[in-house]
Amino acid sequence: MLRVVVADDSVLLREGLVRVLIEAGVDVVGAFGDADSMLAQREALHPDLIVLDVRMPPTYRDEGVRAAIRAREAQPEVGILLLSQYVEVAYAQELLSSGRGGVGYLLKDRVASLAQLQDAVERIAAGGTVLDPEVVAQLLGRRHDPLATLTPREHEVMSLMAEGRTNAAIAQALVIGTGAVEKNVTSIFQKLGLDDSGTDHRRVLAVLAWLQR
């Protein structure tokens, strides 16, 4: 069973999230009101995934992101899901900057169902990347002409890739065949110079390269 730790300074939100996660079939092994307490217990709890608010005590600025980075330094395989009331573009970029998968950034008000949260948790725990569409939109909006060589279809595929969609899910969303999606993804990788090294998470690296041009 997936072991999850939750950190959120709001008691109501924290306890509500714990109950929802338990209903989603995961083992919530710890719940904390601040990032430091979570980090102090993380090693003993050894979670598979950590769910954190971005802003927590004492400064209510970036404690959640800092804690996520520290947790990953100590336990590189742990999944990270940031939940926030707002789109914090700089923090999203910082979380993604390692190029590894197993990360997510969702807006609390836009998590509309238990199934949506369960899907996000499972995808992140499996090494995927899950980003709220609004987070993706604001990340892209900060860059001028990210990749002029992308075709309109590749742009659509790239946006859905950035949300953490699989090729099959992209095909369903765009009403095209999976083979067509694979060709577009391959073309995107080639345009970004991302060769298949067998180790790098190319989908994450493609999104990062697109955002950082």
Image: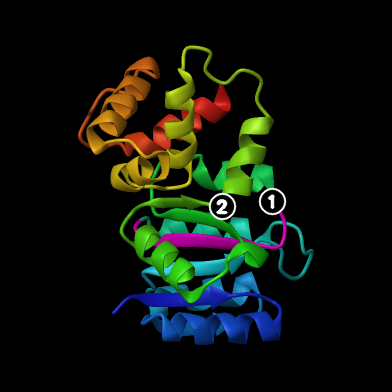
- What separation in Å lies between label 1 and label 2 (alpha carbons)? 9 Å
Q: Name the residue that disc number 2 marks.
A: 132
Q: Which quadrant would the N terminus be assigned to in this image?
A: bottom left
Q: Name the residue that disc number 1 marks.
A: 87
167 horizontally vs 74: left or right: left
Q: Along the polypeptide, which appears first: circle 1 or circle 2? A: 1
Q: Say which residue appears at 39% left-offset and 47% top-offset.
A: 165
Give x and y (percent) for residue 21.
Answer: 46, 80
Which SS class for mark 1? loop
Q: Say which residue appears at 50% left-offset and 82% top-offset.
A: 20
Amino acid residing under circle 1? Val
Mark 1 or 2: in front is: 2
Magenta segment: 77-86
Q: Say which residue appears at 32% left-offset and 18% top-offset.
A: 190
Instruction: Give whichever of 98, 106 is nearer the camera.
Output: 106
Principal secondary structure, stretch drawn in magenta: strand
Q: Which quadrant would the C terminus be assigned to in this image?
A: top right
Name, please, the residue furthest toward the top.
149
Crowding at mark 1 (Cα within 10 Å: few <14, some 14-19, many 20+): many
Crowding at mark 2 (Cα within 10 Å: few <14, some 14-19, many 20+): some
Q: Say whether marks 1 and 2 touch (CB < 8 Å).
A: yes
174 horizontally vs 213: left or right: left
Give x and y (percent) for residue 7.
Answer: 59, 74
Give x and y (percent) for residue 79.
Answer: 41, 61
Hey, which quadrant is residue 38 in on the image?
bottom right
96 horizontally vs 86: left or right: left
Give x and y (percent) for residue 48.
Answer: 36, 69
Instruction: Give whichever of 179, 164 is nearer the camera.
Output: 179
For the question of whether residue 9 can be seen, the reply is: yes
Amino acid residing under circle 2? Asp
Name, please, the residue furthest toward the left.
198
